[in-house]
Image (tube, rainbow, N blue to C red):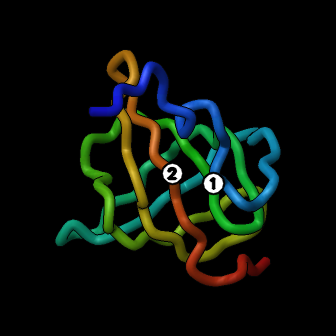
Amino acid sequence: MAYFTSDRRKNRDRRGAPRKEGLGAVEISFSDPVAVTITAALVEHSATGFRAAYDAKSLEPGIDVAYRHDGTRGQARVIWTHVLEGRRVSGFLVLSPPTR
């Protein structure tokens, strides 16, 4: 029987696109089943996605959203959500290229 003392995957960043630090707020809108808009803090972003922190409890993985940040807008999907110290952080996959 094999025993592993560490998980090598934990120390490796598996994201393909380089990330940049996020600045400012991102507005996220979706239907649940009524229209909901939340304001989140942009943590980081790349060409393929972004990470945002917020207090709302209504965003869950699998939900498609519209987002607006710094004059750009686009469509994204919530891929994962973590609760850290009472605040939620989600990773979003951009579904269509952002437009101005």
Per the rendering, the mark at residue 50 is 1
Q: Nearer the viewer, residue 38 or 19?
A: 19
Extreme residue toward the front, this view: 1
Give the CA separation, mark 1 to mark 2: 6 Å
For the residue marked with disc 2, what is the amino acid? Gly
Q: Is residue 16 left or right of residue 4?
A: right
Give the secondary structure at mark 1: strand
Q: Looking at the picture, how far across and down is residue 91, in whole percent? A: 51, 51
Q: Nearer the viewer, residue 39 or 45?
A: 45
x, y percent for residue 86 = 33, 20
Quadrant (top left, top right, bottom left, bottom right) of the C terminus = bottom right
Which badge, 1 or 2, comes first in the chain's sequence?
Answer: 1
Q: Which residue is mark 2?
A: 91
Q: Residue at x 35, y 26 (%)?
A: 3
Residue 83, image quadrant: top left
Q: Is residue 1 above or below residue 29?
A: above
The image quadrant of residue 46 is bottom right
Residue 49 appears at what percent x and percent y? 64, 61
Q: Position of residue 94 (x, y in %)?
A: 60, 71
Which three-letter amino acid code belongs to the residue tagged 1?
Answer: Phe
